Amino acid sequence: MLKKSFLNKLLLGASLIGGSLMAASASANVGVAFVHGTGQQSDAYNDYWTGSMIQSVIQGLPNSSNYTVINCDFTQYMWDSRASGCLAGQLTNFINNKGITQMTLITHSNGGNVVRWILSNPTWDSRFPNIINKTKEVIALAPSSGGTPLAEAVLSGNAFEQSLGWLLGYQNDAVRMQQESWMASYNANWLYGTAGRPSLPKPFVNVVGTDVESAIWDGDSYCGGYSQNVGLEFTQNWLDSCSDGFLNCSSQSAAGSVWFYDKWYTKGGEPLSHAQSRRNCFYLDTYLRNRI
Amino acid sequence: MKNIVLITSTTLALVLSSAVNAKDTTSYSFAIESSNKFVVSHSEYVPSTQSREYSIDVNGQSLQRGVSLTTTAPGALVRISAADGRSAVEPQMMNISQKGGKSFAKGSGFDMLVDSNSMQAQGIGFQRGTTGFKIADELGKGEFTLQTNQKINPNGNYRINVFEKNSDTALYLKSQRGGYFKGDTLSVDAHVFDQGQAQTIRNIKGQLVSPTGQSYPVIFKKSGDGYQVKMPMKMSADNVPGALWELHTEVKAHVNGKLVQRNGRVPFSYDEMTASVGSKVQIVGGDKNLKAMVPVSVKQDSRFEVRGVLYGTDKAGNMKPIMTTHTAQNLGRGAGQIMMEFDAKILANSGLSAPYELRNVELRDQSQMAILK
């Protein structure tokens, strides 16, 4: 399933050309927002995405200054004002300051859940409707739509759980939320886009990471940080045979539709580990650039 | 897909002032494409979990003397986390021996070792002071003794977590419902299966844990080939909105002559029933100002949302979905109603006409983040 033919690459190429033509002919003031994953960011441009990734992707914009990099506290539950509320504030400022009429949201990991909260709960916050209306599509890089068994592992294995850790918030709410069993509940009740649920109001397309390579002799292992890939290879033991070291493929494809599985289109058919799917590894940036 | 937002002047003012949350009526509709089959499952979500792991708490002295671990499949993953978040036990200093068999010194019995620095580097949130390793496949399964030569505080506390991905033995927890309201009876079933066969549970204990970490004792009673908790939910539901409660369970079961431990958790929501929606939803107005009047009986002031799918009729007389509409409004205690305004453009583009019907109606309390219907 994961090894697509040359035909697929041709089809993708054709769609990219078509997409570029459409974008060029549109009169919309197009923008892109980069939405980080779990964590509290103050400089996601450098710390989370890196400048080389962002500068490469925004070359696909008619006006390359029409971008924003979100910095919010995604250690919180997705509905928290410090998470989706913060995101709504920064997106609203971006829309207003740049006069954006159509934007693509590029999310990574849990960022996809926070965006899906906005798309699924338009009356939660008065800023949500305008954001939904201005959103062309969401490109969700390795979204944790179905949660991850690693969140359960983090919570079950920590000695802190029974002591001060809980109160100190060591196990942050975003980790708690991304347990598979919790996400099953939120997907069934509060979020759109998964099987058996209403569709999301805007397209939500996934890039799915399928494997982790951390061979010390393989230069490809170093894209995105070698030590992170080594760690991901360990965590992969909690996961299915198809995973990016943090999320099962089934979780990454649980909401919306699959744009592509990494090996279909990456350079040399390289997999995108969870650390690599937010970096300019193996032409990922080029594919994003051509789609926005 | 066409999206139209209908907002009151008050809400517009809030948008302009970058209000954090909606304070007044907000309505939003989005079209359901005619090509969309709108296949929505109406079966209630029933939480169920499986566990192939267990945890034991030990101190440093036990680790130096040797701790017994039982595994039911080759290749168990073991993590050891120091309660103080600092005094990691490094796997390179650990010895493992099979009961009545060989001993493997200084990590040589492990397929993969992750020291405390590497564990932190992967950044998914394992507690600082955690290390891990995978017991080598060739050591098989059974009883092992894990021992360290590392100098550690004998009184230091550690949690050992053993995850057996390939085990046939699992604890199954199933809640009767995905959500409970104050006054309901919590009902959770617990079984241990091995290759599909129910196993004899020798010991079972558990606790109900709130989102803030408050715990309540529960009593399991034998039920069929498993155990069951039936517990009236009387505690305050005023907790962290949206966060789930969990039943934590630890079992010891006899499996193939060995006592096997499993720890599991199953989550569910727990809320106050603050309002109910009436059955007589009225659809009024013409195609340009179609509305639904949804009666709501409110017990406690809050911000409530009604969402539903507007259906219309095609030329052949078949009902088809047109749009999903969400409307939220602040309501006070007593009899009230929420007026849903349907988007005229989406309606016109659908090509469908009267009679109309509002289906899949849900009432939500946004303040406590609860689905009331």
Image (tube, coloured by chain):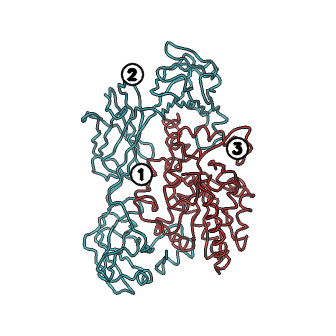
Chain colours: A red, B cyan
Badge 2 amino acid: Lys
Could you tell me residue B28's position as x and y percent?
A: 45, 74
Do we see residue B137 in this rendering?
A: yes
Q: Is the residue under label 3 in contact with that under label 2 (CB below 8 Å)? A: no
Mark 1 Cα-neighbour bin, 10 Å: few <14, some 14–19, many ≥20: some
Q: State how far apart marks 1 and 2 are (Cα).
A: 41 Å
Query: Which residue position holds label 3?
Result: A221
Instruction: Name which residue lies at 70% across and 61% down.
Output: A286
- From the top left corner, tell me how far across and down residue A289 is, in percent: 69, 65
Q: Is residue B351 above or below residue B368?
A: below
Position of residue A284 relative to residue B348, above or below, is: above
In the image, A23 versus A246, the foreground residue is A23
| Nearer-the-camera pick, A56 or A131 | A56
Note whether A196 is above or below B73 in the view shown: below
Label 3 marks a residue whose chain is A
Amino acid type, mark 1? Asn
Quick one: label 1 or label 2, which is nearer the N terminus?
1
Residue at numbered disc 2: B258
From mark 2 to mark 3, how far is it between C-alphas? 42 Å
**Image quadrant in which you'd find residue B191:** top left
Residue B165: x and y in percent read: 48, 35
User: The residue tagged with tag 1: helix, strand or loop?
Assistant: loop
Q: Is disc 2 in the same subunit as disc 3?
A: no
Please state which of the two labelled residues, at mark 1 or mark 3, is closer to the viewer: 3
Question: Circle 2 — which element?
Answer: strand
Specify the subunit that label 1 lies on: B
Q: How many marks?
A: 3
Residue at image mark 1? B239
Structural distance between the alpha carbons of marks 1 and 3: 45 Å
| Residue B149 relative to residue B98: left or right | right
The amino acid type found where label 3 is placed reads Ser
Dot 1 and dot 2 within a common chain: yes
